[in-house]
Amino acid sequence: MHKVFAKYPSMRPWLLLLPASLWLFIFFIAPLFIVLIYSFQTRGTYGGVVWQFSIENFQRTFDPLYFNTFLRSFYIAAITTFACLLLGFPLAYYITTRPPQSRGTFVLALMIPFWTNFLIRTYAWLTLLRTNTGLINTTLISLGILKHPLPLFGNDFAIVLGLVYGWLPDMVLPVYAALDRLDNSLLEAAQDLYASGWRVFWRVIWPLSLPGVIAGSMLVFIPSLGAFVTPAILGGGKSLMIGNIISNQFLAAHDWPFGSAMSTVMMVVMLLATLIYFRSTSRKERVQA
Amino acid sequence: MSEGHAVELRDVVKRFGNVSAVNHVSLQIRNGEFFSLLGPSGCGKTTSLRLIAGFEIPTSGQILISDEVQGHLPAYQRPVNTVFQNYALFPHMSVFQNIAFGLEMQKTPKSEIELRVNEVLDLVHLQGMGKRRPKQLSGGQQQRVALARALVNRPNVLLLDEPLGALDLKLRKAMQIELKALQEQVGITFIYVTHDQEEALTMSDRIAVMSQGHLLQIGNPEEIYEQPTSRFVADFIGETNFIEGTVEGQNEHVEFGIAPNSIMLATWGSDPVPAKSKVTLSIRPEKIDLYTPGKPLPRGSRKIANMPGKVVDLVYLGTDTRYVVQVPGPNKLVVRMQNATSSEHFFKVGDEVTLRWNPAHARVMKE
């Protein structure tokens, strides 16, 4: 290796990139292309993939039966993102107002639950939310506060709750980072220029924290859109998202080409969303540079 | 302008935990005045400014702006504007938007905003820069934007927190002159926080010297320099000589003794203290004259104090020469003599000399 480096110094960066590139190619790029190729094939009679070109899978994706689930997934992901922002922004702001030495503790407290497996935490919500045997309903009924159990489980509410719980830190951390960079004298300058609390927020704090808000929103929206563990467990098998339908095509229906087509559509949508994000942040950074 | 004061502090105290940042400060700032708060870092000058702006609320005491008690009024309801040390320009707004911000918050009509922003851009020589972002401007230009953003609101009082601190020396000197001219032009009361004594002397109508939260002395630049009332002020403003000694008596002048049989005449700087008290005498290097011993005293010089000495060091500085002179006791005095045409004023190291000064310039202070 040493001799190769010495002989061809210009090769050095490429050689150093080789292991990572190989890994990415074998485990990321190649499967992606397989999915893309599968999506244009046909399902065999007993499952498997028949090598026969077809765009029928994509047509089926836009069949109302599936497309409505697509739209519903967008809707749930959007509500989740909005709820995360509503909860996460004040939390992030609160942390930045703490003395510097205790901020780390808050961030740590935010992260600690995530050292436990996601599946186990989602099942924990199951025991809390279940309609007849869940801890919340049984407690409220035995205390006499409720006569009938609340519909906490097996619906969109449960899914959104589970997703918000799961992705909240991904919202808080980038927003916190953006707010932490905010110079306190800017807030004082706004006050000095006759801006009351809310106006300081909308005219100074919010626009300057926007890069963090956009980053956090992408980090919450994209995984929420493709979620399948949370709707599978907390949706009670009734309330499904697109992630569940895709996983069903692969695991239950053995229709790999159709699953691949839906995955491809999802990826294109997410790619577009990411592109929009990068364009908007790079503009923000140009403004600040 | 009204008869009253632009700003008045009445026995203001500000404590942060156990630390008193501002300690029983009372002062009155006149309308249209260029007033400086001068002191080393941590002396309480910036806290005083923040108390006036409304960013801090006094622990006790009262602050009046235009003769109105401010109490707990938040910063956005006070008729003052601030120029921040780091300018604190909004990075996401253009120069125009930055300057228009205060007017917009006061719901000024759009057409008037446009007019006034352009007017103030002219005033600070930034014509045509309205569309730029703050980051596209040089430090000096950003400083002008910060100034314009405050001035456009036509406040009763403009608060400036070391606004020139981030500029290089040459630009700072130019801006000092410009700021002073601008203040005279707009007629707004300026309260200017600085740790730079030269800056304060150059620009101010009056100066308040602060140390450790206390207000030590208020006066015009000449008073602060010529008649310091405390050792701290004498030391902080310009260069001075301190001589330790005792009060030996008092007739027309204070009789100040530094060694047996060596009595010098001086004037009280601080309040008088009884005879035999230990005191410090302060005299500026340029207030001392050196003479060849035995030479007749100049005419009308009865009130001049004499002291023998010996030149131990000298530095030639062009317009003047800086001598270090050993005098009785442990003291070495710095003397600055102008390099006049006559050669009799030049001395060499080792020369015996007589030091003379006008007792009015030698100020005795307790402690």
Image: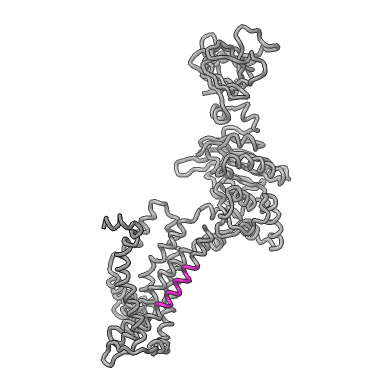
Residue B96 image position (x, y, % from top left)? 64, 58
Residue B366 image position (x, y, % from top left)? 54, 23
Q: Can residue A142 be seen in this view?
A: no
Residue B262 image position (x, y, % from top left)? 55, 10
Q: Which colour scheme is used?
A: one colour
Give the dominant element type of the magenta stretch: helix, strand or loop. helix
Q: Was residue A268 drawn as part of the magenta stretch in this picture?
A: yes
Range of the magenta residues?
Answer: A267-279
- Above or below: residue A27 compared with residue A65: above
Q: In this orientation, which residue lies closer to the viewer: A101 or B345?
A: B345
Q: Is residue B136 visible?
A: yes
What residue lies at 35% left-to-right and 70% top-to-bottom? A166
Q: Was residue B280 drawn as part of the magenta stretch in this picture?
A: no
Q: Specify whether B2 is left or right of B251.
A: right
- Above or below: residue A111 compared with residue A246: above
- Above or below: residue A151 compared with residue B332: below
Residue B351 image position (x, y, % from top left)? 55, 11
What residue lies at 53% left-to-right and 41% top-to-bottom? B13
- Above or below: residue B131 compared with residue B60: below
Q: For the N terminus of chain A, which image quadrant?
A: bottom left
Q: In this orientation, which residue lies closer to the viewer: A77 or B244?
A: A77
Q: Specify whether B207 is left or right of A157.
A: right
Q: Would you identify the image quadrant in which residue A116 lies?
A: bottom left
Q: In this orientation, which residue lies closer to the viewer: B2 or B102?
A: B102
